[in-house]
Image (tube, helix red, strand yellow):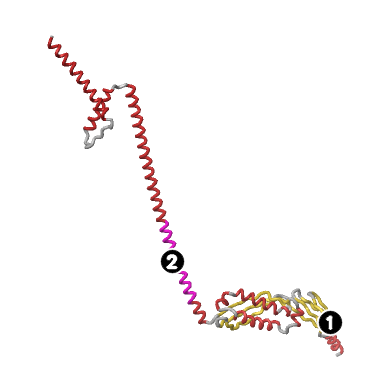
């Protein structure tokens, strides 16, 4: 019996020693901070690592310093235009002062949740339904500023606030769906009309460009034909000019008499009169021409009188 009592005392002593050692040596992880209280009064802040706490005299409170999330339950909010919607959100915060977090608020999670619900009703209640549905970033920013300022004395910092959903009543959702469907149909009709308009414009521009190109081609062809005719007339005129110059030079080189010129003139008039024309244009210096003709007739008379005298002399002999 003495042996058994002795063994039990050794076991109890070892257990008590282990408990005492466990209560004396406390290990704090890197993301935690400890608040040590001695005889119910704040004494010091324990840092990560091995810390010694006197059992029975001191007590340590561990505070998680990592970023935390609070899920704000859904709640009904009346907007500025008297539409009841259901809104919920999430809050991301991180402790900055563990002493304030432990001693300045009893239940931080509940306090932050109630504070978020109250301010969420205030912020969304100042907006109309359309603004509440499309201005989530504005609501998030306003809630963050309000909650961050309110929770500063609790030793926390609100990192961000996110609105998860904004659900209007079913009848409002049905009306919105009809409006959106009508808007989509209108946009489709406008897009189709714009496409047809654009196609008509492109077709008209194509026809216009085709007509312009055709007109430019015809104008260019007419210009080339006119240039060819001009060059032809210039070549003919230059040839006739050279021919006249050569004839004129040959006439002057041959030194013709007035009698010969008058005879050639009469031959030319005969050719002109031999045509089918009903009108004949004579040169303005007709008197000079008639004078030449008279001289020619005198020549013929002289020749005739000489022939007559010769015939008389032959008769007398």
Q: SS for tag 2? A: helix
Please identify the residue farthest to the top as the structure is shown: 317
> What's the CA distance linking mark 1 and mark 2?
85 Å
In-image side of 211 versus 270 (left or right): right
Label 2: which residue?
A: 193
Count of marks overlaid on the render? 2
Which-is-in-front pick, marks 1 and 2? 2
In-image side of 290 versus 37 (left or right): left
What kind of secondary structure does the magenta stretch mostly adopt?
A: helix
Q: Nearer the viewer, residue 176 or 56?
A: 176
Label 1: which residue?
A: 54
Give above or below for 79 relative to 195: below
Whole-percent x, y for residue 276 in the image? 21, 36
Q: Quadrant of the N terminus?
A: bottom right
Q: Nearer the viewer, residue 163 or 256?
A: 256
Give above or below for 247 relative to 224: above
Whole-percent x, y for residue 14 in the image? 83, 83
Quadrant of the rendered image containing residue 156: bottom right
Give above or below for 301 relative to 79: above
Q: Is residue 174 magenta?
A: no
In-image side of 254 versus 78 (left or right): left
Whole-percent x, y for residue 178 in the image? 48, 77
Which dot marks residue 73?
none
Stretch of the chain drawn in magenta: 178-205
């Amino acid at each position: 019996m003495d042996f058994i009592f002795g063994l039990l005392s050794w076991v109890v002593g070892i257990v008590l020693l282990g408990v005492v050692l466990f209560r004396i040596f406390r290990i704090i992880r890197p993301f935690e901070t400890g608040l040590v209280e001695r005889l119910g009064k704040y004494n010091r802040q324990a840092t990560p690592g091995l810390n010694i706490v006197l059992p029975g005299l001191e007590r340590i409170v561990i505070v998680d310093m990592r970023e935390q999330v609070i899920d704000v339950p859904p709640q009904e909010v009346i907007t500025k235009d008297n539409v009841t919607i259901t809104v919920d959100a999430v809050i991301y915060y991180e402790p900055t002062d563990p002493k304030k977090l432990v001693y300045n608020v009893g239940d931080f999670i509940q306090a932050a949740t109630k504070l978020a619900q109250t301010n969420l009703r205030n912020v969304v209640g100042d907006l109309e339904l359309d603004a509440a549905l499309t201005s989530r970033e504005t609501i998030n920013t306003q809630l963050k500023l309000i909650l961050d300022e309110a929770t500063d004395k609790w030793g926390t910092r609100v990192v961000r606030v996110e609105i998860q959903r904004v659900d209007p009543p079913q009848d409002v959702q049905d009306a919105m769906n009809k409006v959106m469907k009508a808007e989509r149909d209108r946009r489709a009709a406008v897009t189709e009309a714009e496409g047809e308009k654009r196609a008509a414009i492109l077709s008209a521009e194509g026809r216009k460009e085709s007509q312009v190109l055709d007109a430019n081609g015809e104008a260019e062809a007419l210009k080339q034909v006119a240039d060819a005719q001009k060059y032809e007339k210039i070549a003919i005129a230059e040839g006739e000019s050279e021919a006249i110059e050569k004839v004129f030079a040959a006439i002057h080189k041959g030194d013709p008499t007035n009698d010969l010129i008058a005879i050639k003139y009469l031959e030319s008039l005969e050719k002109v009169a031999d045509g089918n024309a009903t009108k004949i244009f004579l040169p303005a210096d007709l008197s000079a021409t008639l004078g030449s003709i008279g001289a020619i007739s005198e020549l013929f008379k002289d020749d005739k009188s000489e022939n007559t005298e010769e015939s008389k002399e032959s008769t007398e002999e």
